[in-house]
Image (cartoon, rainbow, N blue to C red):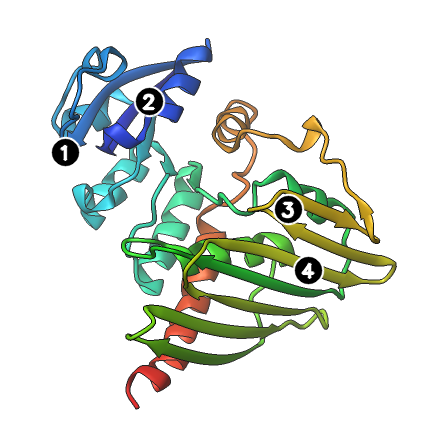
Amino acid sequence: MLKIGLIGDIKLMDTYILSIRKNQNLHISGKSSIGTRTQKDDSICSIPEFNRIELIERSDILLVNYFPLLPLDLVQKSIKKGKHFYAADYPEFSSKECNDLTKLSEEAGIAFHFSNPLFNLPGIQWLNDIIKAPIFLDISYFKKDISGNNQLIELLLLTEGITGLSPKKIEALSFRSDAGNTEFNNLRFDYSSSTVINLSFGLKYADEFVVKVYSDGINAFLDFDNNIFLYNNAPLDLTSKYSLSEFNTFIDNILQKKEPVTGIASYLSVIYTLEQVKAKLFQFAST
């Protein structure tokens, strides 16, 4: 049985806690939490509280959604002790730090998975099954509120999951309007496979997540907010086979000694791309 320690804002882990308690291969060893609940919740109150060091010692897997509680040296020590990681939020590792952690994870043989919510949507899983490079992908991803949001990292994890590559060329454009409380960013990624991805993202009056795909014999339109899915101009039926639990897949991969779907090497690739993107977008912010 694998013992899981919960670290971070536990009130946001209800879905994970429910999933863990349904799995006979898992047991919650305890929590090291921040924040408080506004109402009594037996599912969380019954989980014992430990300091981080003791909880790490008691656990095989650390489920983390607030990495400021884990300084880099503590993450390194945990990896060396063979602790697996499921990152439900994204740590602010530099590319050098992430590169060092990647090497350390490979040496220790542990799974370090980063949550990839957009990539694990049924529509994207279906898309990933049928497309072959080269493709043209047009993605619009806007939010009504982006405070504390990992919008860009989620998009970069999505594109890395689809292509398995880092872009060889990046173009950027950005506009902001304080009066209208809007933000528009556009990125164009060109890949060695001749694939092109066009990303538009930012802040506006309504949530929007639309993916348009063009490839040889493929014309797909996926509107995730309005549940409109079309494939070659016909309605698309996303069957249950694409409804996978990212967390349960992570656990299964550990039990079967498989690589995580979105491991730390993938995150390292995203961090390299993120640094390039921020440098491009900074040109607009500084003018």
User: In the rendered structure, which disc, 1 or 3, sits on the residue that comes first in sequence?
Assistant: 1
Tally of numbered discs: 4
- Secondary structure, mark 1, is loop
Residue type at numbered disc 1: Gly
Q: Tell me how far mark 2 sits from mark 4, CA to CA.
A: 39 Å
Residue type at numbered disc 3: Ile
User: In the rendered structure, which disc, 1 or 2, sits on the residue that comes first in sequence?
Assistant: 2
Q: Tell me how far mark 1 sits from mark 2, CA to CA.
A: 20 Å
Q: Residue 35 carries which label?
A: 1
Specify whether 230 is left or right of 270. right
Q: Tell me how far mark 3 sits from mark 2, CA to CA.
A: 29 Å
140 relative to 64, above or below? below
Spot occupied by residue 225 in the image (x, y as percentages of width and height): 55, 46
- Secondary structure, mark 4, is strand
Q: Residue 4 carries which label?
A: 2
Foreground disc of the pair 3, 4: 4
Q: Residue 212 carries which label?
A: 4
Residue type at numbered disc 4: Lys
| Crowd band around label 4 with a 10 angstrom C-alpha radius: few (<14), some (14–19), many (20+) | some
- Identify residue for label 3: 124
